[in-house]
Image: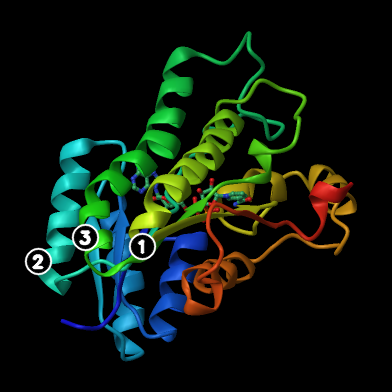
Amino acid sequence: MTERVAVVTGAAAGIGAATARGLAASGYAVALLDVNECAAVEVAATIAAAGSAAVAVQCDVADEDSVRSAIAAVVERFGRIDLLHNNAAVFLGLAGGSDGLLESLDLATWRRTLDVNLTGAFLCTKYAMPHLLVHGGSVVVTASVAGALTGSTVSAYASSKAGLAGFVRSLALNYGPRGVRANAVCPGTVLTDMSEHIRQTPELQRRMIDTIPVGRMATAEDVASVVVFLASPAAEYLNGVVVPVEGGLLLT
Ligand SMILES: NC(=O)c1ccc[n+]([C@@H]2O[C@H](COP(=O)([O-])OP(=O)(O)OC[C@H]3O[C@@H](n4cnc5c(N)ncnc54)[C@H](O)[C@@H]3O)[C@@H](O)[C@H]2O)c1
């Protein structure tokens, strides 16, 4: 019951799965929350097979009842929460890699994007915070360069990610004094299912890689290792920062 416990949302795939593996390797028991329970169970099984404690919990982060019962299940299983990684998100993308010009961006897409990406982080943090406050801990959020760059479209996704940066800063101000730090990672394009539409268009992929100073897209592990660092004692004086993990893209 004294092992540190991490909750990772969207942990069935991509960055969340890589972060769950990285946190387990650095000594955490991990709870993998995802709407896709089967895939989360598979990732948890690989972590458990490597010798760490891991549990998959079905959770839709946009649904308050689902979040409440998922956090309760984690506390029942592991007894505490030391780290929350708010990572689950959707990119309800259209052809060409955008989620819509204003004229074509419908209200349902806007609402679902904000509900999962931004309200989901609010709900998970709201229900995890009482547990984080018990021993002190931290919150890490996965934002995106999409929330920092000026894109050529009006994007629900970009708006949700810009909102997360503000959310993290307000958490840092309000809960830093009570022992809970909050920071964000801000990835560029990462080789996961979410960016599959880019890889399906080689010309778009080439153009995007050409804009990245390090000359490649990120792996999920590139991002996960920064999340693990932000959660670690080595980062205990970092609070309220949004760390770019984009190979220098934001400099261009
Ligand atoms: N892939 C990229 O290029 C990229 C770039 C910048 C930021 N990000 C961010 O990184 C994070 C992880 O994305 P990824 O690239 O690993 O994507 P991914 O699609 O591989 O994984 C996302 C996971 O979130 C889960 N999920 C979706 N809706 C959910 C919900 N309502 N409740 C619970 N789980 C839900 C999915 O089932 C999936 O397992 C997201 O916040 C994303 O916005 C990704």
What residue type is disc 1 on?
Gly
Would the CB of label 2 be found within 8 Å of ligand 1?
Answer: no
Secondary element at tag 2: helix
139 left or right, relative to 1: right
Image location (x, y in percent) of residue 66: 19, 43
The quadrant in which residue 75 appears is bottom left
Image location (x, y in percent) of residue 16: 45, 61
What residue type is disc 3 on?
His
Image location (x, y in percent) of residue 226: 59, 68
Image location (x, y in percent) of residue 160: 52, 33
- The furthest residue to the front: 177
Mark 1 sits on what residue? 179
Spatial CA span between label 2 and label 3: 12 Å
Q: Nearer the viewer, residue 96 or 15?
A: 15
Mark 2 sits on what residue? 76
What's the mark number on residue 131? 3
Which tag, 3 or 1, sits closer to the chain's start? 3
Spatial CA span between label 2 and label 1: 23 Å
Contact between labelled residues 1 and 3, with CB atoms less than 8 Å apart:
no
Which residue is pictured at 46% across the width and 50% down the height? 172
What residue type is disc 2 on?
Glu
Confirm whether residue 10 shows in the render: no
Spatial CA span between label 3 and label 1: 12 Å
The quadrant in which residue 27 appears is bottom left
